[in-house]
Image (cartoon, rainbow, N blue to C red):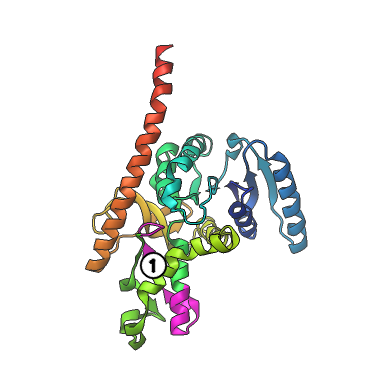
Amino acid sequence: MSKVTIIGATGNVGMFAAYAISGNPHIHELQLYGREGREDFLKGLVQDFADSFAARGTNIQLTWTTNLRDLAGADVVVITAGAPRGPGQDRLDLALGNARIIAPMARTIGMVAPKAKILMVTNPVDVMTYVALHYSGLKPSQVFGLGTHLDSMRFKSLIASYFKVHVSEVHTRIIGEHGESMVPLLSATTIGGIKISNLPAFAHLPVQDFIQSVKSSGEQIIKNKGSTVYGPGEAIASLVKTVLGDENRILTVSAYVKSEVHDIGGVCIGVPARINRNGAFPVTIRLDESEVIAYRESVEKIRASTEQVMAKLETAKEPAAQKKSRK
């Protein structure tokens, strides 16, 4: 039985993710973390959850905290904390501000919960996953992000609707950035085990329209209702279930890649990964030439953003470190 902590549990995504995760049979403690000043809200949230658990027969220990050191013993830490994306705002616009929130959190998690798996949700998720990996000091397999997991599900749903088949018959991936440079893997897409390009209707598949729909889906939801909640929440819950159930499923998440995809790597980015109790392990794959070109461009975009954010974080540390050395 496992302990799962939600950092950012007072936010919309954090609250629903916690509720979705609570149905996992492998969990014995669900811990809700919020910043200082949110104690009353956290108390009320625990009471509300407890009532719903009683109604549905869920037997999980519920706790809350505003102290990161209470995360000791956590098996999975889900991080949703940070500034949300606003209408018309690119995910990368959030990078430095959210990195300044994530870096000290990750450092503390690495110290108090060295065996934990960190699941990053905060945007821009690829850059934040790298920040968490760097500052936590954990192994690459222990830190991964939501990445293009939800994007892949959105793409899968569009394809299923087009071919008029059950969504479970469609297997597809979107890799690369969780953002504008995402890359659909049509070369790895099948319907009922049949390669999609072998189906006559494929000739008329509006791929670019589908990808644009996937790219703009989050923005449209934010524009219409203020925030994305249920899609990310269920996607988070499915990843936590995969980890704690030691399921060895191959899902597309933001993970640190070295040379698994055509020797292109050195960043955290969306890739197919085998996920189990030990974390996320990128799978070695071969792509079509056009996909390789697009993936390389996506990697370089994320690399530039990651290096920029890391440089600014390190620069911000220098004055304090110099001041300390003079004492």
The percent position of residue 236, horizontal first and vertical second, equals 53, 57
Dividing the picture into quadrants, the one containing residue 326 is top left
Please determine whether, in this image, residue 228 is positioned above or below residue 83.
below
Q: Nearer the viewer, residue 158 or 115?
A: 158
Residue 15 is situated, as x and y percent measured from the top left of the image, at 63, 53
Q: Which sits in the foreground, 305 or 159?
A: 305
Q: Is residue 223 left or right of residue 45?
A: left
Amino acid carrying label 1: it is Arg
In the image, residue 211 above or below residue 108? below
Q: Residue furthest top?
A: 327
> What residue occupies the far left of the structure in this picture?
289
Q: Is residue 58 visible?
A: yes
Give the x, y percent position of residue 278. 45, 51
Highlighted magenta segment, given as a residue range = 157-180
**Residue 167 on the magenta segment:** yes
Report x, y in % for residue 33: 62, 43
* 260 drawn magenta: no
- Total numbered circles: 1
Residue occupying the point 64% across, 47% down:
10
Q: Residue at x 43, y 71 (%)?
A: 155
Residue bearing mark 1: 173
Side of 47 relative to 122 (left or right): right
Quadrant in which the C terminus is drawn: top left
In terms of image quadrants, where is residue 322? top left
Q: Residue at x 41, y 54 (%)?
A: 254
Q: Residue furthest front?
A: 88
The answer to whether residue 172 shows anywhere in this view is no
